[in-house]
Structures are given as structure tokens and as C-alpha cells.
């Protein structure tokens, strides 16, 4: 990531445990540059929501330092808190209200409220101001939540697993509208998800978490350029490739080896030659962000 950019979120050496037992992560460090959309990606239980809770002040970090807009998260001023909009799992509360009522209710708390951002999205849903939220589908409610977040006109948007329960159409609407808004208004977005396939259209940078550590932290376009998936027909046992640090998560189905690596093709061929493996059938495969995620974290 561009370390020369102003950091909206700065996390240094964050360590968190469940009680005195399992370590969620140790010495976690990352930054979210201004104007970027960053995805914190990981399987269930890797600490994504815990990170959100720490950044929002719901949990006190056991070790390390977290800052938002240069202020320590344990001492955020009201002015700084007003610059942050949060969307957590579960989407909209107050579902007994109508589309119009909930907009008026929320607007009273935010001096920079932008009602046009809210109603432009409601128009895409073809819903009327008098429609009750309780009568809407889960996907429609998620768009109401997004509209309320955008209307706050905050500088930082924090979204925790926004896609929970959404069908592909509503996920696509959510993603496309959010990206268009964030780029047009120069907003910074920090979001978590364990559903990867849609985020390739949305995020600029990604952090991939495993249990207790960061596996990679880089712009998505660089990840998909530099991280590669290869297949190779071979009779050699998979253990032969597991022992080499060059190959990430090698596996075999019948006689086809699959592995991932950040190394360029010439180094891959050289290493295979060192192992005494015929590389004549080696093929580099096209890869999506989800493929890269599975390549780094493993299938299980």
C-alpha cells in the first residue's frame, strides 16, 4: 500500500486474545490510506469483527495502538466520531418505521446529513417513502442501511460483513452504488467480509487474515498480477512440494499438482528442476480474488 498517503486508520502491534486462551492475532499492523477502499478478508473466526469492535471502541485493545484520523481510538473526540459511519451485521433497526420516517429520525443526529444520497438509492429500489421497512426483503433492508450510511456524509465508512443474507442482485447493487459514491465523494471505506467473489469489483486494497496473522496486505491489482496459480501433471508425491518454501498450499487431485506462489515463472521452473520434477506441462491459470484468497488461506 502507498505509505506516503495520509492514513485514516493506523493499527500498530495489535494483540487480542479470548480470555487467557486462544490468540486471535498477535502484533497485527496495518494502515488504511485516505480515499481508498480496503477489505479485511478472512474465514470465519479470524478476528474480522473483533477488529471492527476494537476500532469502534466497543473493545479495548489488550496490546497495541489504534488511531483514526490521528486520534487514539480510546480517546476519540465527538468531532472525530461524527466523521465515522458504521454498518454492522443485521442492517437496519427500527423496522417498524417507514422509509421516510427513518430518514427523518436519523437526520436529526447528523449535521452534515445528505438526504439526496438516501433517496437516490431508494429510487433505485422503487420503494415509496410511506413503505414500512418491516415489509421489505432482507436485500431491500440492506439498501436502506446503505442509504442511511451514505447520507451521514461521513469521511470514513466502516462496514462489517455487509453481504450477509443478500442475493447476488442486491449484493451487486450494494457494491456498485457504494463504489461509485465513495470514489465520487472521496470517502475512505474499511470493510470486512468472508464472501470474496463480489469484492474484486469494489476494494482497492486487501488484507487477508489467517488465524493469528496477516497473510498478505497489498493492492488487489498487484495481488492478482504477482500471485499465481499453477497446475502441473506429475507423479511426484505432494510432500515433495510441501517442503519447499516456494510453493504455497500445494495439493494434488489424481496426477495433477496445483500450487500458488508469488515467484515469477523462471524461478518456479528453476525450483522444479532442483526438485528433479519435469516442468514441461506447467501451466499458469487465470485467477480471481477468490482464487487468490483460497490459495493463501487454503481450502480447509
Image: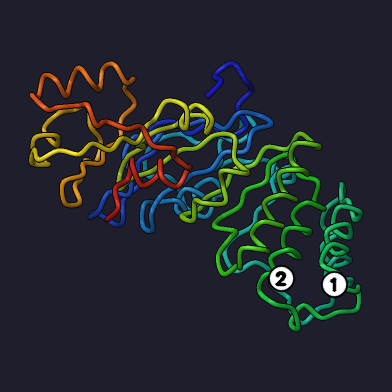
For this view, does 95 lie left or right of residue 264? right
CA gap between label 2 and label 1 equals 10 Å
Residue 280 occupies which quadrant of the picture?
top left
Please report the residue visible at 16 percent of the width from the left and 51 percent of the height from the top: 254
Secondary element under disc 1, as helix, strand or loop, is helix
40, 268: nearer the viewer: 268
Q: How many marks?
A: 2
172, 144: nearer the viewer: 172
Question: Which residue is label 1 attached to?
Answer: 99
25, 255: nearer the viewer: 255
Please report the residue visible at 49 percent of the width from the left and 51 percent of the height from the top: 196
Q: Is residue 136 above or below residue 219?
A: below
Bin the neighbour count of mark 2 within 10 Å (Cα to Cα): few under 14, some 14-19, many 20 and up. many
Question: Which residue is label 2 attached to?
Answer: 141
Bin the neighbour count of mark 1 within 10 Å (Cα to Cα): few under 14, some 14-19, many 20 and up. many
For this view, does 93 lie left or right of residue 23? right
Q: Tell me the colour scheme of the image.
A: rainbow
Q: Of the numbered discs in the image, which one, if any, rests on residue 236?
A: none
Query: Residue 4: where, in percent of width, then height?
Result: 59, 16
Residue 73 occupies which quadrant of the picture?
top right
Q: Is residue 226 above or below residue 39?
A: above
Secondary element under disc 2, as helix, strand or loop, is helix
Is the residue under label 1 in contact with that under label 2 (CB below 8 Å)? no
Query: Residue 85: where, in percent of width, then height?
Result: 70, 50
Please report the residue visible at 61 percent of the width from the left and 28 percent of the height from the top: 33
Quadrant of the image for the C terminus? bottom left
Q: Earlier in the sequence, mark 2 or mark 1?
A: 1
Q: Is residue 158 above or below residue 123?
A: above
For this view, does 253 lie left or right of residue 115? left
Please report the residue visible at 54 percent of the width from the left and 57 percent of the height from the top: 161
Query: Residue 220: where, in percent of width, then height?
Result: 52, 33
For this view, does 141 lie left or right of residue 185? left
Amino acid at each position: 500500500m502507498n505509505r506516503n498517503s495520509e492514513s485514516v486508520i493506523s493499527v500498530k502491534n495489535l494483540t487480542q486474545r479470548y480470555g487467557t486462551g486462544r490468540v486471535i492475532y498477535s502484533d497485527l499492523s496495518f494502515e488504511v490510506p485516505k480515499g481508498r477502499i480496503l477489505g479485511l478478508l478472512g474465514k470465519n473466526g479470524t478476528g474480522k469483527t473483533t477488529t471492527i469492535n476494537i476500532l469502534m471502541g466497543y473493545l479495548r485493545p489488550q496490546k497495541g495502538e489504534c488511531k483514526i484520523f490521528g486520534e487514539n481510538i480510546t480517546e476519540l473526540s465527538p468531532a472525530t466520531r461524527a466523521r465515522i459511519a458504521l454498518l454492522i451485521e443485521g442492517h437496519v433497526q427500527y423496522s417498524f418505521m417507514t422509509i421516510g420516517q427513518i430518514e427523518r429520525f436519523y437526520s436529526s443526529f447528523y449535521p452534515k446529513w445528505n438526504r439526496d444520497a438516501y433517496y437516490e438509492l431508494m429510487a433505485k429500489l422503487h420503494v415509496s417513502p410511506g413503505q414500512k421497512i418491516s415489509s421489505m426483503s432482507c436485500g431491500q433492508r440492506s439498501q436502506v442501511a446503505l442509504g442511511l450510511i451514505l447520507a451521514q456524509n461521513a469521511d470514513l465508512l466502516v462496514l462489517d460483513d455487509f453481504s450477509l443474507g443478500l442475493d447476488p442482485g442486491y449484493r451487486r447493487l450494494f457494491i456498485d452504488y457504494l463504489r461509485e459514491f465513495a470514489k465520487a465523494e472521496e470517502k475512505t471505506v474499511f470493510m470486512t467480509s468472508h464472501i470474496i467473489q463480489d469484492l474484486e469489483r469494489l476494494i482497492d486494497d486487501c488484507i487477508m487474515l489467517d488465524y493469528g496473522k496477516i497473510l498478505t496486505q497489498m493492492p488487489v491489482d498487484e495481488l492478482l498480477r504477482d500471485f499465481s496459480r499453477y497446475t502441473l501433471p506429475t507423479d511426484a508425491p505432494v510432500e515433495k512440494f510441501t517442503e519447499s518454501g516456494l510453493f504455497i498450499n500445494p495439493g494434488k487431485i489424481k496426477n495433477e499438482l496445483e500450487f500458488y506462489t508469488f515467484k515469477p515463472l523462471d524461478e518456479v521452473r528453476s525450483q522444479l528442476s532442483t526438485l528433479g520434477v519435469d516442468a514441461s506441462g506447467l501451466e499458469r491459470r487465470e485467477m480471481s480474488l477468490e482464487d487468490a484468497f483460497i490459495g493463501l488461506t487454503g481450502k480447509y
